[in-house]
Amino acid sequence: MPSLDNPAALHNEATALYQANKNSAAALTWARAREAARTLGDHATAWKFGVWQADSVRLAGDIRRSLGLLLSLLSDIPPDAPAHVRWMAQKKVFTIQLGLRPERTRLQQILSEMEILATKQAHSPHDLHYARGDLAFARGAWEEALGHFARGWQVYEEGGQVKNHFAWRAV
């Protein structure tokens, strides 16, 4: 099988599995792609595949393992790692922490890191509004949450959070 050593072919295979909702298989395939990229010395691609692996692990139901993998990846980001994938990793950590252990101080710290990151790289302008809305929602600050979701809807651009999620959260 030529894809065993070909990170791009393994990535394509993992993507197809991910899109078919076969998340456990996608996670294993991205782990193989990650190792193949690392073996070739392509640390940025290996890092990116690790983030996709973590997301697949999360979708397969192992949220704690996903969080551990994401935190490990975020502690050692290659300088040439894709900015949009770094942003995605930060968003996933925020979302997982919100669901697992909604400690206000930790969530505000993650949100602050995302806000700093937002000043340094491209991101979907609505993503921060969604995260702020989720944090307000978790605190029971309904009016504040609704305001964040409404602002996110207004500045929405393709990419990042799906637009109908703003309407769903606002309900």
Image (spheres, rainbow, N blue to C red):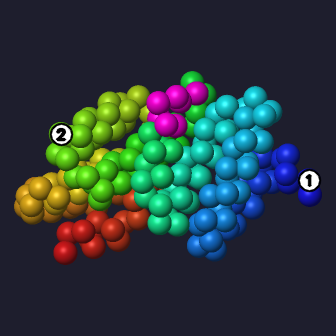
The residue tagged with tag 2: helix, strand or loop?
A: helix
Residue at the spot x=27%, y=73% of the render?
168
For image coordinates 67% across by 50% down, the residue present is 31
17 and 72: which one is in front?
A: 72
Asked whether the viewer can see residue 49, the reply is: yes
Q: Is residue 44 above or below residue 171?
A: above
Q: Position of residue 153 (x, y in %)?
A: 28, 61
- The residue that appears at 85% across and 54% down in the rendered structure is 3
Left or right: residue 102 versus residue 24 is left
Taking the image as shown, residue 109 lies to the left or right of residue 162, namely: left
Quarter of the image holding residue 165?
A: bottom left
Q: Which residue is mark 2?
A: 105
Task: Name the residue nearer the viewer: 130 or 42.
Answer: 42
Is residue 87 at all visible to an observer of this figure?
A: no
- Percent position (x, y) of residue 136? 15, 54
Q: Earlier in the sequence, mark 1 or mark 2?
A: 1
In reply to whether residue 77 is colored magenta, the answer given is: yes
Amino acid found under the numbered disc labelled 1: Pro
Q: Quadrant of the C terminus?
A: bottom left
Range of residues picked out in magenta: 72-78
Res. 157 image quadrant: bottom left
Query: Around disc 1, counting alpha carbons within 10 Å, would you say few (fewer than 14), some (14 to 19), or many (20 or more)?
Result: few
Residue most extreme to the top: 79
Q: Which residue is mark 1?
A: 2
Secondary structure type for disc 1 = helix
